[in-house]
Amino acid sequence: MDIKSLIKSDMIRILFQPIHDYRHGYVIGYEALARGPEGSLAEGAKSLFKAAKQSGLRMELEMHCFRKALNEYRSKIAGDGGLLFVNFHPEILAGNCDEIISELSGIRERTVIEVTESYSRIRCISGHLQRLKGKGVRVALDDIGAGDRSLANICETRVDYLKIDKQIIQGLTKVKSGDSEYYKLLLKFLIRFGKQSGALIIAEGIETFNQVSETLNSGVSLMQGFYFSRPKPADSWINSRLAVKER
């Protein structure tokens, strides 16, 4: 798999997945997600970025995806007023902060930079995150609660959004095992933490109406997942901002 050729030939696809405010019935923004050519070994994000890392081209791939996402957003989605959520590995973000700020000229206040909460050294880039925030860019911590994560990160990193991992959201409906009540307690703790720290909560990985219902009952209105839509090309979302419909 030749990552350099994929970048040079512009074969990396950028898809967008909406983030819904379910309680109020509208889309607040779109997360940009990178995919390789359809049907290729690099189609999935994990295989694509794994190959880039092995080739020593992680930075080149991330910056290419970032610029392409910006172009697609500016030309096709920005007109509806929704936010743009873009992902960065913390090390790539730290090494390219000046360029990222420059590239975001004109849409900084409408951009949310997502960094994964799993990265053990995320606290070491807090200065870069605060610099972004000082320029009007919002910041989100992604994958909160997934696997072996350090919750110290959410205490030592000031962000605008906490994106709760799908494992917690799926746990809300594990009634038979008796685990659901504990997942609800954990989610309510994170909601309370978010309120007191000034961060909004987004539930990721919503796949069923039961998960929607339990998430909403727990106090979270912002949701993202296959229940609403799979990631699609920007053309699919032009002037959409469709109201959320119960199914």
Image (tube, grey):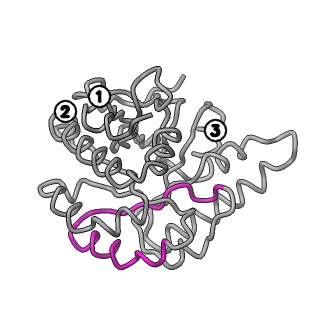
Residue 237 numbered mark, or none: 1
Mark 1 residue element: helix
| Residue 42 drawn above or below residue 180 | above
Q: CA distance from mark 3 to mark 1?
A: 24 Å
- CB atoms of marks 1 and 2 within 8 Å: yes
Residue at image x 35%, y 55%? Answer: 59
- What's drawn in magenta, residue-wise? 122-146
Q: Amino acid at mark 2?
A: Lys
| Residue 17 drawn above or below residue 163 | above
Q: Which x, y percent locates residue 61?
A: 34, 47
Dot 3 or dot 2, earlier in sequence: 2
- 195 vs 76, left or right, is right
Closest to the observer, 243 or 232: 232
Residue 149, quarter of picture: bottom right
Q: Amino acid at mark 1?
A: Trp
Residue at image x 39%, y 26%? Answer: 37
* Residue behind mark 2: 76
Mark 3 residue element: helix
* Residue behind mark 3: 211
